[in-house]
Image: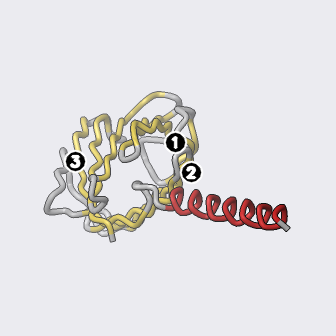
Amino acid sequence: MRIKRLAAFATTFLLVALALQVTVAAADALSGTWKVNLAKSKYSPGPAPKSLTVKIEADENNIKLNSDGTDAEGKPTHIEYSAKFDGKDYPITGVPNGDTIALHRIDANTYESTLKKAGQATMTVTSTVSKDGKTRKSTFNGKDEQGHDVNNVVVYDKQ
């Protein structure tokens, strides 16, 4: 009888531990829907988009990003990628100055992206989620598709 109780307790404990692990993974700081805050963002050279919403699903090893918006001219934009935080190149779509992206996770709230076109780095983006989890800041440094310097600081609010 004691063995059956011990087995039942061990099974219950294991299931609770697994459920907690799944909950912790789902609660990654990077994950969520983020809307650009144009008043707090700085675009150099500009112009800023009219709107931008980024949806991220992430855990400690992987990220999936979908971004939809409207550019300064009123045209729709869509950027998408799925990658690992392992520094290897993964395909990215919707970015004129890049066809691959490589990611490094710096800490639980920060990661660095290197955008590449034909194997050459064109842009580095460092993204950090605030400690309270309400804002995300991405700093863009590199060149746009025309070769102009880009130094953008884009602030997003969690939805």
Distance of label 3 from label 1 (alpha carbons): 22 Å
* Residue placed under numbered mark 2 in the picture: 82
Where residue 14 appears, as percent x and y from the top left, is 69, 59
Compare marks 3 and 2 and give the one earlier in the sequence: 2
Which amino acid type is shown beneath numbered disc 2?
Ser
Compare marks 1 and 2 and give the one earlier in the sequence: 2
Q: Is residue 121 left or right of residue 127?
A: right
Where residue 72 appears, as percent x and y from the top left, is 25, 63
Crowding at dot 3, Cα within 10 Å, few <14 / some 14-19 / many 20+, comes out as some
* Residue placed under numbered mark 3 in the picture: 153
Compare marks 3 and 1 and give the one earlier in the sequence: 1
Count of all numbered marks drawn on residues in the image: 3
Circle 2 SS class: strand
Residue in the picture at 73% in, 60% down: 10
**Discs 3/1, front:** 3
Which amino acid type is shown beneath numbered disc 3?
Val
* Residue placed under numbered mark 1 in the picture: 99
Residue in the picture at 16% in, 51% down: 42
Q: Is residue 23 left or right of residue 11?
A: left
How was this image coloured?
Answer: secondary structure
Which amino acid type is shown beneath numbered disc 1?
Asp
Residue in the picture at 39% in, 67% down: 33
Q: Quadrant of the C terminus?
A: bottom left
Q: Nearer the viewer, residue 53 or 104?
A: 104
Where residue 89 appears, as percent x and y from the top left, is 56, 35
Where residue 145 appears, as percent x and y from the top left, is 36, 41
